[in-house]
Image: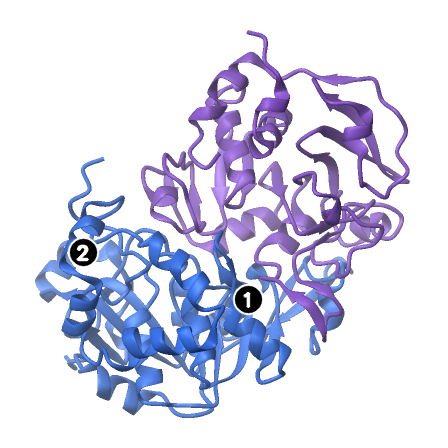
Chain colours: A blue, B purple
Amino acid sequence: MIEKLSNLHDAIKKNVSSDDLIFIGGFGHLIPFYLTHELIRQNINNLSICRSGADILFDQLIASGIIKKVIFGYIGNPTVGLSHSFNRAYKFNTIEIEEWTNQSIIMRLHAARMGIDFIPSKILQIGDLPENIQFIKKIISPYTGQEYSAIPSLKPDVALIHAQQADKYGNVQMWGIDGDTVEGALASDRIIVSVERIIDNKEIKESPEKTIIPSHRVTNIVELPWGAYPSYVSGFYSRDDQHYISYDSLSRNESELERYLNEWVINVDNIELYMEKIGKENRLSLEKGLCGTLDES
Amino acid sequence: MKVNHREINPDKRIAMIAAMELKGYRSCFVGIGIPSDTACLAKDTIEPNINLIYESGAIGAMPKTKSYSTGSPSIAHRSDMITDSFSVFSDLQAGRIDVGLLSAAQIDIFGNLNSTVIGGYQNPKVRMVGSGGAHDIACLIPNLIILMPHDPRRFVEKVDFITSPGSGAAFDKLRVKYQLGKGPSILITDKAKFVMSPSGWNLDSILDDFTYEEAVEGIPWKLSVSNKRIKIDQDILSKVDSISGL
């Protein structure tokens, strides 16, 4: 069997190019922060990024100036506030946007996953959103004459996702909140997965129902423990809500945000440094938090 | 127990009034914040059979700590089922989820909601987070309840952008034509309950300890007087402090 293990640098270098459309996984849970930060460190630019609900990882990518276009249903810092870098870029017209809804983005990915070019739907037929989406068209059911919106497929070149574990062949196991992560991955041409740990194929075979992407679809596996911080990984560590709250105030100010990106992205060029940056005490408290490995509630 | 409702914080007042509207429903599509807190309060008191459904795919959660995202640990932890977003949105489109709760930055007389921009779409004064699942819920859910803090800036003649479509002459026929839900039927503020009519919102009832003037203050719609009073269920009143986000 083909082995898919890679170091982070090569996995990104070999599979992502300027002008690519990238799906980024994680729905509150399993957001691939460290894996995706590598795009910034390698300064791969002119990228288009997509997902349904986007949080501060999108904000960081936009702030780094490597994004040409954002395709989204929601963009913000959930409960805490707005995506300030997105707002600045929108205001100064430095990014293109394609604004949909969460359901329509997921349908678009689902269509690509199914290998078809649209899905009929009842949504996006009334209100101000449809007329602001350039290329949404209508379709009449050949069976009943019912009128639907024809939600076009969205096929990313590459998906970046994070999961709990995988074997060296690329069988990926994930549990907890999925959102549109598996949908987006399976819609994409290439799939790069960072995981908390590499396990033996024997262990995969003991619970194959946990495998959500089979080896033949996976391009590369990168072992990056704590790679989803400050989001969380069920069974490993909880979400650092405080990090998201602090990010809101610092990202309002461009020079403070630049300092943050240097501190948390540019200068943290291996995962051990990222873990050190999170801090031993904080890591322990997140392991004890809800859904963490030491959670006793 | 004699309570002065003025001493209860506004978010809790919204959740208490709205929770009473959930009686009889079996499944509820909720977002984070007051909608989720309202549904939790109802489940803990007058409607134990209601199932909470989040767009992240979590079903049957009863969060014990404050949640920031619909995918947060507190939503996943001890839920009954975690499926994917495609599945719950499919159930929504198929009409398999009974009731939805939404909030937004702006609302108008026909229940159109705006969570996209303040000002023009191309050159907004404030660019907000966008629809998320709000447009989808507003189009598809059979029964829709809107929750709004009573902040006069939020109540407008016409929203700057219709993210989530409402009811009324503009949309009623199209909703039938496209097989959509009937649109918002109830609006709850921290002082009153409004119900939808063909000509827009009507004031239905006012929370105890508040006056008509307070219930309609700063709201630009023509609203007739109502003497009906909202009496909060005792069980809801006694448990509102135990809801994590409130």
Residue B97 placement, left or right of A172: right
Residue A22, quarter of picture: bottom left
Tell us which disc is closer to us: 1 or 2. Answer: 2
Q: Quadrant of the N terminus of chain B?
A: top right
Q: Which residue is mark 2?
A: A283
Q: Residue at position x 50%, y 19% from top?
A: B45
Q: Position of residue B88 (x, y in %)?
A: 50, 49
What separation in Å lies between label 1 and label 2 (alpha carbons)?
Answer: 34 Å
**Total of numbered circles in the picture?**
2
**Residue type, label 1:** Ile
Along the viewing direction, whichever of B169 and A110 lies nearer the viewer: B169
Q: Of the two numbered discs 1 and 2 on the same chain, state the one appearing first in sequence.
A: 1
Q: Residue at position x 72%, y 60% from top?
A: A143
Q: Is residue B145 visible?
A: no
Q: Position of residue A269 (x, y in %)?
A: 21, 81
Q: Which residue is mark 1?
A: A105
Q: Compared with residue A5, is residue A55 higher up or lower down, i.e. above or below?
A: above
